[in-house]
Amino acid sequence: MQATSDLLQGTLDLLILKTLVTEPMHGWGIARRIQQVSRDALEIGQGSLYPALHRLEYKGWIQSEWGESENNRRAKYYSLTKSGKKQLVAELEDWDRLTTAISLVLKGV
Amino acid sequence: MTRVRLLVRRDNAELDEELAFHLQREEEEHRAAGMNANDARRQARIAFGGVERAKAKCREARPGFWMEVLAQDVRYALRGFRRNPVFTITIVVTLMLGIGATAAVFSVVDRILFRALPYAHGDRLVSVGLVQSMEPQEFMLGHFYYDWRRDQTPFEAMTSENAVTRVCDLTEGSSAQLSCPIVEVNFLPTLGITPAAGRNFLPEEGRPGAPAVVLISYGLWQTRYNRDSGVLNKTIEIDGKPVRVVGVLPKGFEMPRLQAADVIFPMTMDEAADRKTNSGLGGPKRVFARLKPGVSVEQARAQLMPLFEQTQKWIPAEIRSNFRLKVRSLRDRQMQDVRVMAWVLLGTVLAVLMIVCANVASLLMARGAARQRELAVRSALGASRGRLVRQSLTEALLLSLAGAVAGCAFAELLLHIFLAIAPASVPYVTQAQLDLRIVGFTVALSFVCGALFGLVPALQRPREEMLTGRSIASVSHARMRQWLVVGQIAASMVLLTAAMLMLRSFWKLENQQLGMREDNTVTARITLGEHKYSSAMSKMMFFQQLATRLRFLPGVEVVSVSDSLPPGGAHAGVRYGEILVDGKPRTTEGPGSVVIARLVSPEYFRALDVRIVRGAGFQESDLTSNERVVVISQRLAEMLFPSEDPIGMRLNFEHVGDPNAPWYRVVGVAANVKNGGLTGEETPEYYFLRRYRAEDWGRWGVWAQTSVFVVRSSLTEEETSKAIRNQVAVLDPTLPVDIATLRQRVSKLADQPRFQVSLVGFFALIGFTLAVIGLYGVIAFLVAQRTQEIGVRMALGAARADILRLVMGKSLRLIAVGVAAGLVAALSLSRVLSSLLFGVGPRDPMTFGAMTLMLVVVGLAATLVPARSASRVDPSEALRAE
């Protein structure tokens, strides 16, 4: 829980979009993947993942579909849409700009 | 709606499934890592956090979420209202009164105060001319008008109409009497009026010898010519002469003086002739002008001063100082003193609106205070501040909407009542209709004040102590509500004193002695058209014939014919200084006040029951005599002959301007009559006899067209009226007759004060009632809040009387502060009313004293109820409530 509030505003969206680039996933899978990839450094508050997923879906960046899960149960799978891909590119650029700027400032001091 | 609900339900089901899957998967993972079932479930829950919270957040992310919330808020608010119907009804009725009254009065006043005149750039139009004590409306004379028009600098254009709007007859088809103003050819263009059809007058149509052309009104075009454009360039017959119609006036056209206009004639501008008519004065005109852009009325007046000084030299020295230059905006010219009334009404209604807002605010704050615990609970259960604020706003909006709907209906009703009682002297009032912008404005205002005060409790961070249910009432609210009540009492004090002043003034007006008899007296006013009755002889013949016919009607006791009737003013008169007494030097004091004159038949004094206090008055023999005789009023007699007997004295009234004016012998002194209008003073007056001579019937130009018959009979007023109508029809069936009892004519003069007093009184009552309700509410609330304290006091030995005194003392303090503030405000504002008052000073001590007493008494009575309930508090119960 605490970790999410430390995440920069909008960063969760970026992480979700990035995670979905490779393949459609369900919510639990997304949470898991972010945790693994960040080597458990970023623990997503699982509860706050879903409102973000729904918001992104309403914005049209991801879409959902009910499918069969790895343990043979009905699960909701999310995948990137075209505009979601575009959004990801834009957000990555923003992110790069931001981190560069921050590191510049930090180095400069 | 059901579809939306189904959709929402499906979404919720899917969300449940999705989250359940997540938890299950997480649990499986933990089980796989070797945990037992319980620990795995627990761990999964911990990792997830609040499930319901997540669900709520997901729902909030939906785009239609606000609608769901709104629907929920509305449902919640409605449920709240239903639970508390007294509160709801009080607020809605309060709002209804406020919104309704404001909207209705604004709709009437708007046209008087703020409406744009129906002319292009109407704000730049002015009325300009001279005024004098006998003619307070600005006028000009042909003798100098042309010089002014040529030499003036402040105006873009200057134009005029004949001071007298002619009565003319349409003499084709079924003939009819019409109102026919005569205007300069540039009149309509100067006002910025374009005809609805056809064209304006051409410059050459104002030159002598031009072919006769006219513009007709839209109304005439519609009723007479069926809106047929074929009427253009057609010749119609007016007063027996053919005239060509060249244009039709636009639909809403109004003459600047608001008189009727059926057919408009162009004025023939023959400067040389115009300077000489009217015994060398030139034709009287009403002059209007359009200011150049950026020139103010004051600047225009200053720039006209040289012209005025030049004109003054030409005015006879005796009366020169009596003439002044007057330039005022057309709107002021049209509204006269109605403006003051409109402002007073507006002020009244705004005061009522303030009281209404204060009441709504106070009620909502009381409710808010009572709901603090509920808010605290909701907040503890996770309702965000925003949510609580939204809830309050929804409630305020719903209440103002309900108030607005009720208010609109109420406004419509009020407007109907206004129109029914409004006197004809208030311009435009019949055209008033409910203005939606104004309704919108008042609704917005009530919403704002509802929202503002409804929000106060919602915005305060609910404190945890609230949950305990102890009444830690926010003191600030209570204090604010008390200030609101003080404001309400002050405002209603102002309203009440204003209403009372006007009521007393009206009462005096209605009950004053007119000095004449009003009962069983029917009057008939008849105006003869110039066409059929062109000579003074023909007019005399008609009026005498009619008088004779009326005299022989069964039951008729007396019939008199005069040119005018009191208490209205007369058409003519002189200034006091102009009256010459034979054998006495001319008075050297300035021109002095006005002395009015009437032309009467010998029976006049008997018909109106005006006593002849000295002398014999007019005799039948005087009608055929060569000698000119006059009856003067007691007032005039006292002024002219303080120590002598006036009978037999010879007076000359018209020597200014006419050295050969005739002398008149005084044959009687008549008792004073209320003759300067109802609110005016008793003006000195003299009466000329209309003998059987054409010259006596042709006096005073156009006024000779009109005569007023006074008929007293033993029949009922309806029968007399009918008989008069029949007799007129026998002589001339086309002639319109204006019949009214003398009482009606007198009462008509009181129409405007009656209108004012009923409206202001009505609003004052509304305001007062609301203020008292507000006071009651606050005291009741304070008592409820202090129940425990009262219980403790009683437990410690306080008697009932002490508690009663405690509560009443509190109330009295509020009332005292409010009344004091109101008195100060009322005393400083009431000066505005002075022009509307009659026989009562604007600071009438009786009015102020009575209203203070009434407010204090009624206010205390209103607090008696909560005070008594406070004194009945059962200490043991009050303390147990802790």
Image (spheres, rainbow, N blue to C red):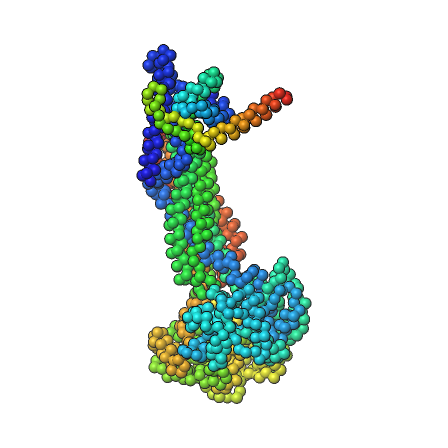
Residue at 43%, 76% in the rendered image: B176
Residue at 56%, 24% in the rendered image: A99
Residue B359, picture quadrant: top left
User: Residue B778, position in %: x, y?
Assistant: 41, 41
B480 relative position to B18: left or right: right
Residue at 62%, 20% in the rendered image: A107
Residue at 49%, 22% in the rendered image: A6
User: Residue A48, position in %: x, y?
Assistant: 43, 25
User: Residue B804, position in %: x, y?
Assistant: 39, 39
Q: Is residue B856 above or below residue B807?
A: below
Q: Quadrant of the N terminus of chain B?
A: top left
B673 relative position to B862: left or right: right
User: Residue B733, position in %: x, y?
Assistant: 39, 80
Q: Is residue B11 above or below residue A32?
A: below
Do we see residue B720 in this rendering?
A: no
Residue B588, picture quadrant: bottom right
